[in-house]
Image (cartoon, helix red, strand yellow):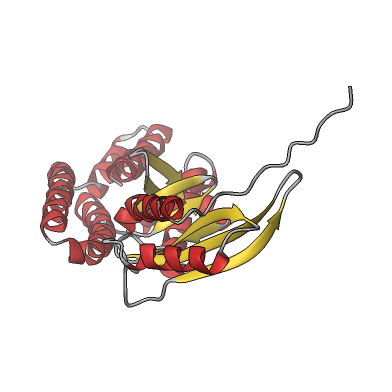
Amino acid sequence: MLRILFLVFITTFSSLSFAMQEVPDVTAIQDFASLVRWGGVLFSVLIIACTWLLLRFIDSIVDSVSTQFVQYRMLLQKAQSFLQFFIYITAGIVVFMISFRINDHILALIGGTLAVSVGFALKDLAASFIAGLTVMIDRPFQVGDRVTFEGNYGDIITIGLRSVRMRTLNDDIITIPNNKFLNEVTVSGNYGALDMQVVIPFFIGMDQDIDLARNLIQEAASSSRYIHLPKPVVVLVKQTITENYLAIQLTCKAYVVDTGYEKLFETDITLRVMKEFKKNGITPPRIAVSSQPA
């Protein structure tokens, strides 16, 4: 956002300078100088620096409090996103108001400058900005959601005016332009909630005890330390046929207490089920290997 403020600021001054060069007389120079509040320009630089420091301070406070109070992490991240948006808009308006004397001439120059900038140099940036407003209003996802987008899977950490940042499960930070979300499908696993459904498939042979296997999976999921018990644990059964084997697929659908524990929850249930399957003699499906004629 600070780059946006600098870009608009510099573009405006360039247009004013261009207008001054067309009529290089004393009157034009005086008119140009009368439009700019030079004291305000220096103060604007200070405001931009203070805005940057304020945003960094807010980031550090939210990170610190979220670590201490995990139950408020989602709320704090959402509040941070809206607060940053408000600070961006406020800082931009203040910088503009204190740097220029508003009259018909300056409004005409600024309007022409913005029209050209949006049409050419700032076309993609303006599209991302508008898309950012659309994302904020339409809310296809929220800060803290675990989202799948274009093959990427992770948590939304910030929603900005130009882009959205996602932290993947490999701890990579992905920056996605906002206009990408207008035409692509986004899947949110929890949509603002702290808990999320986790789907874990298991496969056993056709000759195994299906009821026993289903009960073992149900018990393993219900006794996990990461389970969100207010929501049900469901184990679905279906027959799966592939090219070379026939099997029973048991799909466990359970809710993890926090999206941050998704993979630990999945690992915990898988290890428990495999241990119980081995203890009770439940085996995986046998793959039929067809013999080739000599």
Q: Where does the image place residue 91, in percent across and percent down from the top left?
A: 22, 55
Count every numbered label the image shows and give the total. 0
**Residue 69 visible in rendering:** yes
Pick the front one: 238 or 82: 238
From this view, report whether residue 86 is shown above or below residue 118: below
Q: Where does the image place residue 106, in percent across and percent down from the top left?
A: 35, 53
**Residue at x 51%, y 50% (from the top left corner):** 149
Name the image quarter holding residue 102: bottom left
Q: Where does the image place residue 4, in percent across and percent down from the top left?
A: 34, 44
Pick the front one: 106 or 180: 180
From this view, report whether residue 28 is shown above or below residue 148: above
Q: Is residue 27 left or right of residue 19?
A: left
**Residue at x 67%, y 61% (from the top left corner):** 239
The C terminus: image quadrant: top right
Q: Is residue 231 left or right of residue 95?
A: right
Q: Is residue 142 left or right of residue 236?
A: left
**Residue at x 46%, y 57% (from the top left corner):** 130
The residue sitting at the right extreme is 294
**Residue at x 65%, y 45% (from the top left corner):** 286
From this view, report whether residue 204 is shown above or below residue 288: below
**Residue 139 visible in rendering:** no
